[in-house]
Amino acid sequence: MAYLWYDGVSFFNEVNELDKKKHSFKQLLQALTDIHGVPGNEGPVREVMKKWLTPYADEIRTDRLGGLIARKGEKGPKVMLAGHLDEVGFLITRITEDGYLQFQTLGGWWSQVLPAQRVDVITRAGNILGVVGSKAPHVMSLEERKKGTPLEKLYIDIGVESKEEAEQLGVRPGDTVVPISPFTEMGNSNRWLAKAMDNRFGCAAVVEVMAQLAEKELPNQLFSVGTVMEEVGRRGAHTATAVVKPDVAIAVDVGIASDTPGMGNLGSECVLGKGPTLVLYDGGHVPHQGLVDLVRKVAETENIPFQYEWIQRGATDASHIHIHDIGVPTVTLGIPARYIHSHASIIDKRDAEMLNRWLVAIVQRLDQETVNALY
């Protein structure tokens, strides 16, 4: 029997009975994080994001890889806010004769966060519950315990007895696999836990900005974008940017919180609840300094506390957006998140609220004169 999982579109339809202009950011983020969509398979997430954007956008279209592009406004400089639709997950590569599933990672994973975790295997016949197989410690050598299990030796157990039984359930190579971890408000109601905060949070933020500006007259054209395949090389940033042709851009993504035991000295110290983040450097992007100065000035004017982040390895969609055509002044803004690229990440809703307010204030200031002054 297929394992039934949360349907973000149905969740939207329930919310649709309400006044969507009064939706909560929590509802929006839950709808986006609970739906599944690994790189190259973002369709279900795109549909949820599209439904939430529809009341506020003048036009919604896609690029040819599936990136979602919503526009508000007809005149003025083009301002692009981009989150990415995809989440880290897995791709089935082989079914063994005993019915176990071997897989390829989609995005960066550390093998030690995987054993004994529940997953959804997404097949043409429906979703099937699985668990990442792990060896009992009783039969591990001391050396194995120290090193852990490498990714290539892990497998997924869907509880069948043969390859034939797995195929009868609809499993085939190329099917995708996603962690099971529903959105949860924790004991401290400011803390929200879910899979795919990286980067459904960014998608939720760019929807929220357009929603908050729905009744406002803008000095620009606002594009709220959900890109595809960020986790496998930021590929969708190329195609979405080619459609928008922005004059200025902000990539919205989560950063790495350093406020948990064992994190050590990361250089940048980003703490949950202390405000959104401004990325000064990552492995693919040095931000435009004129735009950095502008977003800092807006934060100071609006009394929005923020934190600096720099990332030596890894990059955001900004890495590809900023080199489009003759160049696009670009910066990455986000919030800290704990345990990204695992089954469950934690963010703080106060950081989210402050970031949304920051983004709204920035967009409202980006008139033609201000944008021209950046170059």
Image (cartoon, grey):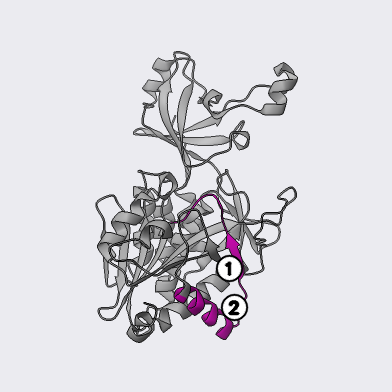
Residue 163: x, y in percent? 42, 16
Residue stretch in magenta: 290-316
Residue 234 locus on image (x, y percent): 40, 51
- Give percent across and percent down for residue 301: 56, 85
Q: Residue at x 44, y 47 (%)?
A: 231
Q: Is residue 103 magenta?
A: no
In the rendered image of this protein, does residue 90 appear above or below residue 99? below
Query: Which mark, residue 211?
Result: none
Callout 2, which amino acid?
Answer: Ile
Estimate how packed mark 1 is, as few (under 14), some (14 to 19) or many (20 or more) residues with alpha carbons within 10 Å. many
Quarter of the picture holding the N terminus: top left
In the figure, 55 relative to 42: above or below? Answer: below
First-in-chain label (2 vs 1): 1
Q: Residue at x 67, y 27 (%)?
A: 147
Asked which secondary structure carries label 1, the reply is loop
8 on left or right of 282: left
Quadrant including the C terminus: bottom left
Callout 2 secondary element: loop
Find residue 310 and report its horizontal and vertical position in percent: 57, 60
Occupied quadrant, residue 245: bottom left
Q: Residue 304 has which mark?
A: 2
Can residue 19 be seen here? The reply is no
Amino acid bearing label 1? Pro
Q: Is residue 339 visible?
A: yes
Please tell me whether residue 305 belongs to the stretch shown in magenta. Answer: yes
The residue under the point 25% across, 62% down is: 243
- Which residue is the site of mark 1? 276
Near-viewer residue (281 or 333):
281
CB atoms at circles 2 and 1 under 8 Å apart?
yes
* Label 2 environment density (alpha carbons within 10 Å; few <14, some 14–19, many ≥20): some
Which of 278 and 344 lies nearest the eye of the viewer? 278
